[in-house]
Image (spheres, rainbow, N blue to C red):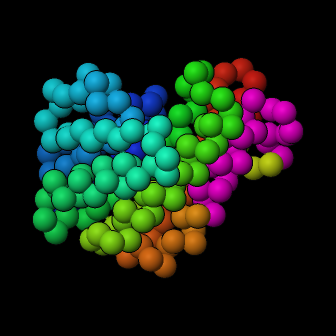
Amino acid sequence: SSHLLVTGATGFVGRAFISHAAMPGTRVSAIGRSHQRLAAAFGNIPGVSCFAYDDTTSGNNELAQAISAAIDAGPVGAQVTLVHLAGAAHDSRLSDEFRGAAIDSITDHLVSALVDGPSARVINVSSIAARPDQCGTGARLEHYGRAKARSEVLLAGATDMLDGGCISLRPPAVWGPTAP
């Protein structure tokens, strides 16, 4: 059996991904910052469990705890695949600097949560904004892009520690008419 863990589950891409991934034989753990938003989005979908973490705490240790709890609640012996979407990309209440710091912290802690667990692989959904030639100084996506680029580096460095490896994908940014 397989067990998908999805960070950033209540985001635009996360909601769409989970709605397609939740099928018989696949356990899905939706991981996000708000238990209320998780429950509203996925509470009625069979095979989907919700795990919330508080991203305001220093060091973001609660994300690692949420990932560990999701793994522990999943099927024994299942192939764990973490789809890393988290990044608070479109939360207009957050500054660009905070968005970047959130991605850094989330990435740091998801690696630590996975290396001590069962065989796991990571699909890191980065962004075309991670390419410096796509986001110049002062661009709206600059901090987000730098943080997503750092997530690629952090996860590439952790590939040897993850039994299932890691791959980073760079889809176009979903941000509006000025997105690269």
Image spot of residue 87 (x, y percent): 53, 40
Count of picture labels:
0
Relative placement, left or right, of 65 versus 96 is left
Residue 139 or 33: which is nearer the viewer? 33
User: Is residue 112 highlighted in magenta?
Assistant: no
Residue at the (48%, 66%) spot, across then down: 166
| Quadrant containing the N terminus in the rendered view | bottom left
Q: Which corner quadrant of the image does residue 94 belong to?
A: top right
> Does residue 125 show up?
no
User: Is residue 139 highlighted in magenta?
Assistant: yes
Q: Which residue is farthest front?
A: 58
Q: Which corner quadrant of the image does residue 42 belong to?
A: top left
Residue 128 or 37: which is nearer the viewer? 37
Q: Which residue is farthest right?
A: 137
Q: Which corner quadrant of the image does residue 81 belong to?
A: bottom left
Q: Which residue is farthest bottom?
A: 160
Q: In the displayed structure, would residue 153 be above or below residue 63?
A: below
Image spot of residue 73 (x, y percent): 16, 54
Relative placement, left or right, of 100 versus 74 is right
> Does residue 135 show up?
yes
Q: In the displayed structure, would residue 84 be above or below residue 158?
A: above
Relative placement, left or right, of 146 versus 52 is right
In the rendered structure, which segment of residues is drawn in magenta?
Answer: 133-153
Residue 158 or 130: which is nearer the viewer? 158
Q: In the displayed structure, would residue 26 be above or below residue 165?
A: above
Image spot of residue 51 (x, y percent): 27, 41
Residue at the (35%, 30%) spot, across then down: 34
Residue at the (49%, 52%) spot, across then down: 59
| Quadrant containing the C terminus in the rendered view | top right
Relative placement, left or right, of 78 versus 145 is left
Residue at the (60%, 59%) spot, across then down: 152
